[in-house]
Structure formats: structure tokens, C-alpha cells
Image (spheres, coloured by chain):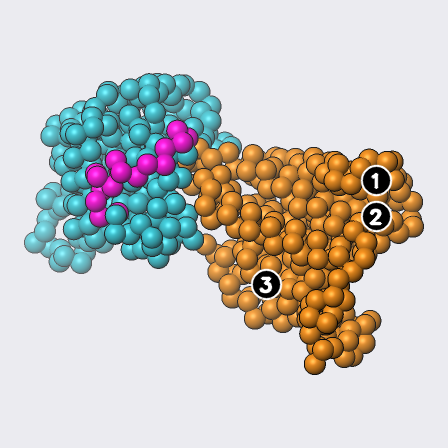
Amino acid sequence: MLHVEDLVVRYGSAVALDGVSLQVEAGEMVALVGPNGAGKSTMVNTIAGLLKPSAGSVRLEGRVALVPEGRQMFPDMTVEDNLKLGGWSIRNRDLAEVLDLLPDLGSLRRRKAGRLSGGQQQMVAVGRALMARPDLLVIDELSLGLAPLVVDELADHLRLLNRERGTAVLLVEQEVGLAFDVCTRACVLDAGRVVASGTSSELAGTEVVRRAYFGDLPRPEDLNTEDMNTEDMEEVIR
Amino acid sequence: MNELVGYLVSGVALGSSFALIGSGFVVVHRVTRVVNFAQGSLAVLGGMLSASLLGGRLPHGVGELVAVVVCGAVGLLMGILAVGRRGTPPLISLIVTLGISLLASAAIIWLWGQDPVSPPGLSGSMTILGASVERQRLLVLVATLLTFAALALVFSRSYLGKALTASASNPFAARMVGIDVRRMGLVAFALAGVLGGLAGVLVAPTNALSFSSDLPLALSGFAAAVFGGLTSPLRTLVGGLCLGVAGQLTAGYLNGSYQTEVALLLMLVIMIARSKSFVAEEAK
């Protein structure tokens, strides 16, 4: 479905992605995790065709649609218009299919997208991407700035979408717990390179994931906690 | 009392031409966030072309139509220069249109000379509510109302209209869903060319146009468009009509030479009063 091979993307002299390979098969849910600045958003924008790779290749079989970071609504337009524009590339203006999958959007149809809460906007962003009837849905930071309860609900919708439509999902997340929970397979990105990949259960709690996020700091359980109060520990983790 | 009604009627007729010119500003700004400084030049070009074509024995209707179509093509060309390169910031595009308007004045002098030109239009006048109004001005009013109805329909109802609006509302998201933002900008400029040409063709029979008419035309149209926050066709129409009436009342009760100043003053007041909404628009 999605075959990324030895992808290199540069911003001027800075290398954002340095030889990244990643596959997503049809109907699969894959997580791409990593800390800030790992190159996740660069990866998303390259897959979506908004950035040109310096080397390597991105091969897509089927349609891809993007749920971008920060939701990216058309703020002064209604939810209905936002959704309809999502289908622009295939001239799909029929909301029925998407409302069937995300029924909550029905009651928001006439509201201005810019006036909605973050969670509602994220749901519109997912719905808008689905209007393009994608074979692969790429989601950039599903959980960013949202309450855990809202994120759980969105995650349920994704699982349902995957199960009922067979839509493949590439979930790009900072929140490792969520990513591993939703996706069966994951890839850990750090400083523009893939540092680990495997099934979510293999990766969960491993050293390499921890190190990608916290660097070479000592693990909390390795510290002599008797000599430290919690404030000091939080300081170290930060 | 009869006097007042007369000023109101002629003000509405005059104001509709302001609104028609303003519609070009609205279309370009709504889609690209660029203020097209060459909008007045398009109207002058439209008037000049129709004068030459009708003088060259093209029948009424055909001559005007050809002039409007040519203006549409010129508008498209302006668009290619101003927004044709992807990622050009609106401010740079605005300066490009300013340059085009200077160039257009030179081209118009070169082609048509410096004397004012006025193509034939509808002759005679009608009496409405005791006020005598030239029939050509009524034609402008009718054409303006039809144009604005069409614009409002396109922007609020059609799929293309929504994509046009989305291009400026959030260019990144528009590109993401597959809207060709650059092409939408070109569509807007071509449409602005047609609207500018139409305004020139209709206004020129009652107000002779010369190479230097672009600025006063653009100013009155811009003032009307500012009423609509440079994005709303309906409020631009209302703005144009208010300006026309205010100008006629000034001319009638004070002094005709204050007309432009009153229009500019009104525009200033509105811009200051609405400055919040302009900022909010940018901040989105």
C-alpha cells in the first residue's frame, strides 16, 4: 500500500529525514512514534506529496488522505462545507457515508468549524479526510491538545473504520501509549532515522523507545530513589 | 421632498456602479487575500475597448461582449504575473498589481491617447418618483443587481465557489484536500477582469473615461468593497449604494466637488470601525 524506501528530506542544509524506510500493507494499522523534531511531520508531508524528497522514494498504491497536525479547518466555513471540500479530489459531495461512520458530525453540520472544540475539530478533520475515500489514512498527532476521553473516542472510531472498511491507517503520534494501543505494528523515529520497528507488543516498554524520548538519561528505576524526592526525579526526566 | 427622492434615486444608480467595480476587489481578495490595485485599469480598458469596437461598427451587444471577454483575458494575465508563482505572499502580489496599473496607464495612453473616451450607450432618461434618471444608469443598476446575485450564488452555493473561498481561508488545508490554490487565484483574477471590464463598459457611456480614470474608479469601488470587509458580495452592494446616495446628497445639499472627499471619509470611518474584523481575518 505504502512503500517508503531510503527516504532523505532536507530543509536547506538540515537533514530532517535520513534514509527512512517504512511499509504499510493494505488494511494495516501502523504507528510512527518519536519525540519532537524526530521528523514525523516531515514524513507525513512527504507522503502527502506536499514536500519533495531529496533522495529515496515514496510509492503509494491507492488513495491517501491526510488528517494534518493542528486540524487545519476552514474556520469560517461550516462543518458541512469542510467535509464536502474533503472530497474535492474525487468530486465526492455525498456526506452519508462519513456521517454513518462519525454520527456525531450530523448535529454539527451547520456550525462554523472555527467555533468548535478541539475534539470536535479533530473529528471533522478525520471526516474530511474520509470524504476522499482513502485506502490509506495518515493521521498526524491525533491526540495533540485533546482530553484523554476524547482521544479514546476518536481511537474507537479509527478501529471501527479499519475493521469495517479495511482502510489502512498510519498513525503518527507522540503519545506512545495511544499509538501502541491502536496499532498492531510500530516504527520508532529519532533524529531523522528509524531506530526500531516491530509489533507494538514487542516494542512496548523497551529501552530503545525510552531512549528516543528521554535520551541517555538514567531510567527512573535505576536511580537511587531513596536519595531523591519526586521533584528531583521529574527534573531528570524533563 | 421631491428633491430628496431625486437624490436618493440617482444616488442608488450611481452607487451601483461603485458596487460593480467593488465586486472585482471582493472576488480577488476573497480568494487570494490580494488587493488588486489594477482593478480600476481593467474598467478603463473595458470602456476604451467598447468605444473602439462600437466605433468600428460592431453592433451593440457584440462590441461590449468582446470588450468584456478581452478584459477577462487581461485579468488572467494579471493573475499570472501577480499570483502565478506558488507561495508569493499577498503583499508582494499587491505590489505587482500596483506596477501593472502604472504600466496599464502607459499602455492606454499609447493605444487611445490622453483624451477622454465615451462609447455610445442607451440614450434618453426616465422619470422615477419624480426624479429624472438616465436610462444607461438604470441599465447599470440592473446589471449590478444581476451580477451580485450571481456572485452570491456562486460563492455560497456552488462547489467551485466553496473551493475558491477555501483557497484563502486556509491555503495549506486547501492544497491538502487537492484544491489547486494557484489555479483558483487565476480563476479569481480572470473573473475580476470580466467584472472590471463589465463595469467599464457600462459606466463609460455616462462618465467618459481616460487613462487617469482608473484611480477615482478604483477608489470608489474599493470603498464599496471595504463595506463588505473585502469578502462579502452582498455587503459590498449595500456599501456601494450607501456611498452613491451619500455622494449625491453631498452634491445636492452642499457642493458637487466634495463628492470624492465624502466617499474617502466614509471609507476611512468604516475601515477604522471595522479594523477589528480585518485583523481577525488575518489572524485566522
Is residue A214 visible from the viewing direction of this image?
A: no
Q: Residues within 10 Å of mark 1 (few under 14, many from 20)?
A: some
Q: Earlier in the sequence, mark 2 or mark 1?
A: 1
Residue B182 in the image: above or below residue A53: below
Subunit of label 2 = B
Indicate the quadrant where residue B62 lies: top right
Image mark 1: chain: B
Q: Which mark, residue B120?
A: 2
- The residue beneath circle 1 is B54
Amino acid, disc 3:
Val
In the rendered view, does A131 fall on the left or right side of B226?
left
Identify the residue shown where x is 70% and y is 46%: B198
Q: Which of labels 3 and 2 is toward the front? A: 2
Chain letter, colour orange: B
According to the image, label 3 marks what residue?
Answer: B238
Q: Are marks 3 and 1 in contact (CB under 8 Å)?
A: no
Q: Quadrant of the N terminus of chain A?
A: top left
Q: Secondary structure at mark 3?
A: helix
Residue A110 rendering spot, x and y as whole percentages: 33, 53
Q: Is residue A68 above or below residue B231?
A: above
Residue numbers of the magenta segment: A89-105
Alpha carbon separation for disc pair 3 and 1: 32 Å
